[in-house]
Amino acid sequence: MPQCIREKEDMKITICSRIDHLKDTLLDIARYIYDNPEPSFQEHRAVAILTKHLAEVGFHISRPIAGLETAYAARLDCGSEGPTVAMLSQYDAIEGVGHVCGHHLIASGALGAAMALSTLADELCGTILQIGCPAEEGGGGKVIMVDGGAFDDIDATLMFHPYDRTVVMNTYHAQQSLEFTFHGKAAHAGGAPEEGINALDGVLSTFNAINALREHVPSDIRMHGIVTNGGQAFNVVPELAACKFGLRASTIDGLNDVVDKVQNIAKGAALQTGTKVVIEKGAAYYNMVNNRRLGEILQGNLERLDVHVDAFEEESTASTDYGNVSYVVPSVYPTFDIGAFPHSEDFQRASISPEGLATMILAGKALAMTVIDLLFDGESVEAIGSEFRRSVAGES
């Protein structure tokens, strides 16, 4: 075995040992973020504790990033020049619900990998980044960061997500939210209904037309909505009503097509009911484009860790703003099995269980080992970049 390969494998053994040494600290941080849930763009406590520990091991902290106060970039230059590899984290919770998506595990796992790698920096070539990304749960933090250039000049990014299956490459769907606010005219519903214009009718007409559309869209399309304002009293014709929809498709082009159709439905509902509609579009989350070569390197490290992999590649109808990152830099998004599907009570319990926390430690090891591979092997980084450039150009 060549000396460099033997050295690399020795470093992987060392990095796993160092993450084990950090275990108690990482578990405490994961529990702290879980116990102090913060909604999108308000994750100040999480950022404070994460950046504190990164700074203590030599990372240079930059914040805000792209104008976002709860985004950060922690940078550590290694002993020699080489590629730049970033491990991403997210740490927001759903307001009023808490951590039902395991972001406390994502943040702590990436932190552990970065802290352990800092102890080997003098033996590696390149730059290690740990980038903290706010507001994944609908706020589109990474979308804003991509637009602000936060991922420029990076050779590869890695991030993991707890899930109900272990999959090396999940191809998440594109997503966009649309909010429709209908304006009508109030009147007494019993005494003079003819003088009113019912804004709720605009909302109900929108729902009915979208339900009719379901039969005539491709099978990958998802359309789900809620009424956010249905009026205040049953005996008053509602002068204002609103609804919000999430739309998903397997590709960004498919998403744009259904977004246009649903917007036209809302405009038609306003015309039909005599109301006026105001349309607000949320950030568009792109579908996830995983880099296969990067996935293969990660899979090799999962095998070294004796992790059972359910599938190398799998389609998920969930969505993430990490998809936008995958359009500008080679990326891979593995999931790690903690025994439950996100956004459920079972998942929330599993994410703070001893088994869920142990999986976070395992995921941190897989990320750190993959970073070692990339900072050790320029040819692999070049192959990853070549594949990415072909995918951006639309080549197979």
Image (cartoon, grey):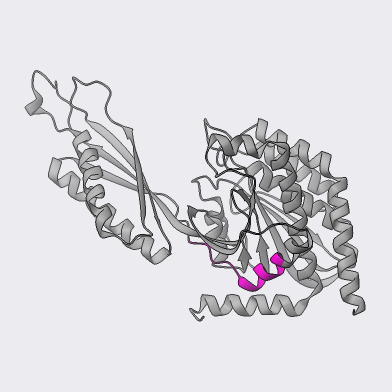
- Image spot of residue 225 (x, y percent): 35, 42
Front residue (pair 383, 72): 383
Q: What's the residue at 19%, 36% (across, down)?
A: 201
Front residue (pair 290, 157): 290
Front residue (pair 90, 97): 97
Specify whether 294 is left or right of 20.
Answer: left
Q: What's the residue at 74%, 58% (across, down)?
A: 366
Q: What's the residue at 48%, 78% (across, down)?
A: 394
User: Is 69 within the magenta?
Assistant: no
- Can residue 154 be seen here? The reply is no
- Image spot of residue 83 (x, y percent): 75, 71
- Image spot of residue 349 (x, y percent): 62, 34
Image quarter (top left, top right, bottom left or bottom right) of the N terminus: bottom right
Specify whether 55 is left or right of 184.
Answer: right
Specify whether 263 is left or right of 2.
Answer: left
- Can residue 212 be seen here? The reply is yes
Q: Is the magenta stretch mostly helix, strand or loop?
A: helix
Q: What stretch is highlighted in magenta?
A: 287-299
- Image spot of residue 102 (x, y percent): 62, 43
Residue 118 is drawn in which quadrant?
bottom right
Relative height, residue 340 to residue 247 (above, below): above
Residue 174 is drawn in which quadrant?
bottom left
Front residue (pair 34, 349): 349
Relative height, residue 290 to residue 378 (above, below): above
